[in-house]
Amino acid sequence: MRFSSDMIRLEGVWSGPLHGLSFDVAPGTSAKIVVASEERHTALQRLLFGLLPPERGEVYLLNEPVYRLPAQERLRLFRRVAIVPEGGGLISNLKVWENILLPRAYHAAFDDAEIETRILGLFREFGFGDQDTARLMGRLPDTLPAHEKRLIALARAMLTDADVVIYDYLFSGLERKVAMDLVALTGEFQRRKTGRASLHVCADDAFATLIAVDQSIGAG
Amino acid sequence: VSAVTDPIDIVGRSFLRTVAYARGVDALVRYAIWHARALSIPPVRRVFQKQIYFTGIEALGAVGVIAMLAGIVITTQITSLVGQNARLMANILLWTIVRELGPLLTAIIIVARSSSATASELATMSIRGELDSLRVLGIEPNEYLVVPRILGITASVAVVTFYFQAIAIVVGLAYASLVQPISFSENLSGVMSALTIQEVLVSLLKGVVFGLLISATSCFYGVSASGSVTAVPRAATKAVMRNLIMVFVLDGVITYAFFI
């Protein structure tokens, strides 16, 4: 094992269709990894989310070997990692605002008024009016289209103080303009904290080339 | 086919399932008690409060109606049996309602209302991968989903049991004073003088034990559901049936331990 201060690092990972995948994302940088198939995407997603140990190799987040940590330590590690899953990863019996606040309320105290202002600000940047946002907040996730679920997961991630952010197919199915606005927004979020690292997991499509990052990685 | 119809195989599988169930429920109860301090986390406390509302407060109407009817029916039977003997009537009323029917009927109502709801809600979350979503957020699913449900349902069952008993006894005595020339206060003082602290404590114990059992069983079948959507009704059915059987078994055990 080599010493490194990388925020995300995969070392010779084998998992299903991924054979010997290695890459790293340094502190304060952003990267995109383009996956050519849904099978590879699923495998990479599960590896990065701490849900499936690799057959071979090692996955590091914040310099910690994710799959060698005891369960409690792994949970503690993921408090410093914000993930925006393709499907949103929302909790079905919580309303939208409860979903957005869940990790923040679970792990730290917060000021209600400040959070409300931040949520309204975020959704304005997503293209929602304040009334639309207020209406959206009271809905359950199952009544929402996929891209709105992803935006809610994005808002949830942006309310945390994560050191590592992983965006999973964030832009798929979005209007080009909304997607470009989100690219700018995620870039700004990444710069808001010194040393924060971001990884975009992208489909192998024309839009992936438009995502400006410090590093591009291919996952076959 | 032979594996399915072989009686030894059926008994063996059933035994193994029962052992897995007992170990799972035991682990969840221990976990809930050990992690009760998680209620200080705002989202966990909110789930706990919702659980109290759904299992306790929302059940009060149905429990009240059933308690009133049970009080009237039991009093009618006692009156036909012992006539105008207020003291004996008070004793029998206590034995049936405080010792047995109060905890038992309350538990059955809670099983019918909350057990299937809890099991199917958790099973749905489980098969949709929401337990993994919680882990990705750095949240231990058992701490967030199981602890508040077990503690909320247990507290609700204990309180609703007393509510059932109070209504059944008061309505039963009121009914008795209508059909017999014995005043309500005379009947009530008979009940109060026959009531012992042991009966109250055993009743509380039954409420707590039934609450732990119902909640842990429902959570166990809920969080262990996997596969397709057909796992949801299966989890709910298993939780309800297992709870009904175990409530009667534990009721018998506690009654035997304290009153025989």
Image (cartoon, coloured by chain):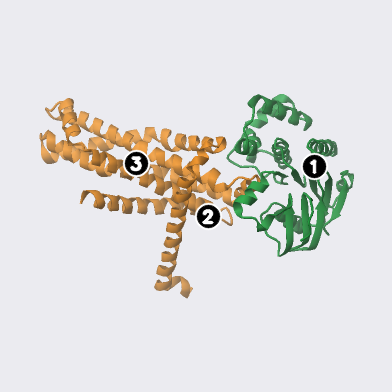
Q: Please name whichever residue, A92 or A99, is drawn nearer the observer in this view of the structure.
A: A99
Residue B160 in view of the camera: yes
Query: Disc 2 versus disc 1: distance between alpha carbons?
Result: 40 Å
Q: For the residues labelled 3 and 1, say whether their Cβ atoms are less than 8 Å apart.
A: no
Q: For the residues labelled 2 and 1, say whether their Cβ atoms are less than 8 Å apart.
A: no
Q: Colour of chain A?
A: green
Q: Which mark is residue B106?
A: 3
Judge if badges 3 and 2 mark residues of a common chain.
yes
How many C-alpha atoms fall within 10 Å of the one at disc 3: few (<14), some, or many (≥20)? many
Q: Which mark is residue A195?
A: 1
Amino acid carrying mark 2 in the image = Ser
Amino acid carrying mark 1 in the image = Gly
**Residue drawn at 41 percent across, 65 percent down:** B15
Query: Disc 3 versus disc 2: distance between alpha carbons?
Result: 26 Å
Amino acid carrying mark 3 in the image = Thr
Query: Dot 2 lies on which element?
Result: loop
Question: Mark 3, mark 1: which one is toward the viewer?
Answer: 1
Q: Position of residue B208 (x, y in %)?
A: 36, 43
Q: Which mark is residue B224?
A: 2
Q: Which mark is residue A213?
A: none
Q: Position of residue A118 (x, y in %)?
A: 72, 28
Placement of A79 over or under A134, stated as above or below: below
Query: Disc 3 versus disc 1: distance between alpha carbons?
Result: 57 Å
Placement of B45 over or under A202, stated as above or below: above
Judge if badges 3 and 1 mark residues of a common chain.
no
Q: Is residue A81 left or right of residue A194?
A: left
Q: Which chain is orange?
A: B
Residue B132 in view of the camera: no
**Residue drawn at 70 percent across, 35 percent down:** A159
Q: Please name whichever residue, B245 or A145, is drawn nearer the observer in this view of the structure.
A: B245
Query: Dot 3 lies on which element?
Result: helix
The numbered mark, 3 or 2, whose residue comes first in the sequence reads 3
